[in-house]
Amino acid sequence: MKIFAHTRWDLAPVLAAVAHLAFDVYLIVGFESRPLWLSAILGCLYAVSISWNINSISHNFIHTPYFKPRWMNYGFSLLESVAIGFSQTYYHWVHMRHHSGNSDRPDEKGDTIDLLSIYRHGRDGQPENVWSYTFLSFFRDSLGDIHKAIARNRPFDAAWGRFELYFFLGLAALALVYDWKAVLFFVPFYYIGNCLSSLNGYYEHLNGDPDEPIAWGVSSHKSFYNWLWFGNGYHAEHHYRPRTHWTKLQALHEQIKDEQEKNGTHVISTCHALGFMAKENRQSELSHES
């Protein structure tokens, strides 16, 4: 029986997801035996790991599910929900709305198709401030609305998404019983991790062009970043061809790079999470000011 739907290379993100979940468990189980300073360092790593998983493993799984058997994909979706602390099925719906709008600007009613658009809460057609986007996006999701939207066409998936969410909350409750101090200690790092994911998403689209498909996203072609984040740096390429497997994004870039340059696709020299340090973003800001 064929297990992987696309390539055996998907074993890499699958094992990485299992390792992430094991790390989450270790944070709680080993809390009492560690000094607080070490747990604080691990908490910072935990925060980064949430953004890393959401924007690489979890993200790629949405577009190119790793497994051939459907039950295995549902099982992996549950595993990911526990690892990132949010329903993977719900995230799937939000992310596909993201691709429907591609960080679109507000319409005449002030609404956007993309619920994650950096323009959604901006003013005068400009992107929202990076700080408010980073720290407030976590509180803007309406789980009830997401569930209802999924249930209209896919009632089983809506029920599965709710199960994923309750399963995670149930495990969190057990963790509280096991060591409530550990859980409360890592809650702020959980929030920071989601903020880092929003920060990552912000610079995946800042200085992109919502009206030009090949320039919808912003790319970073740094080799180590793309190796560690399973191709997430090729974000403009991904938005242009969302169904391209993460192992083929570099090849896609080589095919369309001349067209990208012609149409002004924005490329930065840092990873997306450090986009505030990218000289290309600063140059673009100065250009707009002038």
Image (cartoon, rainbow, N blue to C red):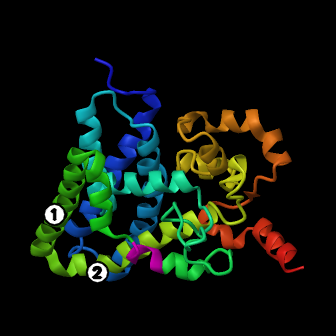
**SS at circle 1:** helix
**SS at circle 2:** helix
Q: Which residue is mark 1?
A: 171
Q: Position of residue 220 (x, y in %)?
A: 68, 54
Left or right: where does residue 155 sit relative to residue 80? left
Magenta residue span? 136-140
Q: Position of residue 88 (x, y in %)?
A: 33, 53
| Lower position in the chain sequence, tag 2 or tag 1 | 1
Q: Quadrant of residue 66?
A: top left
Specify whether residue 138 is painted magenta.
yes
**Of the residues tagged 2 and 1, which is closer to the observer?**
1
Q: Which residue is mark 2?
A: 185
Left or right: where does residue 60 sit relative to residue 122? left
Q: Is residue 86 visible?
A: yes
Mark 2 touching mark 1, by CB under 8 A?
no
For the point 47% across and 55% down, the residue is 97
Between 41 and 283, the one lying in front of the other is 283
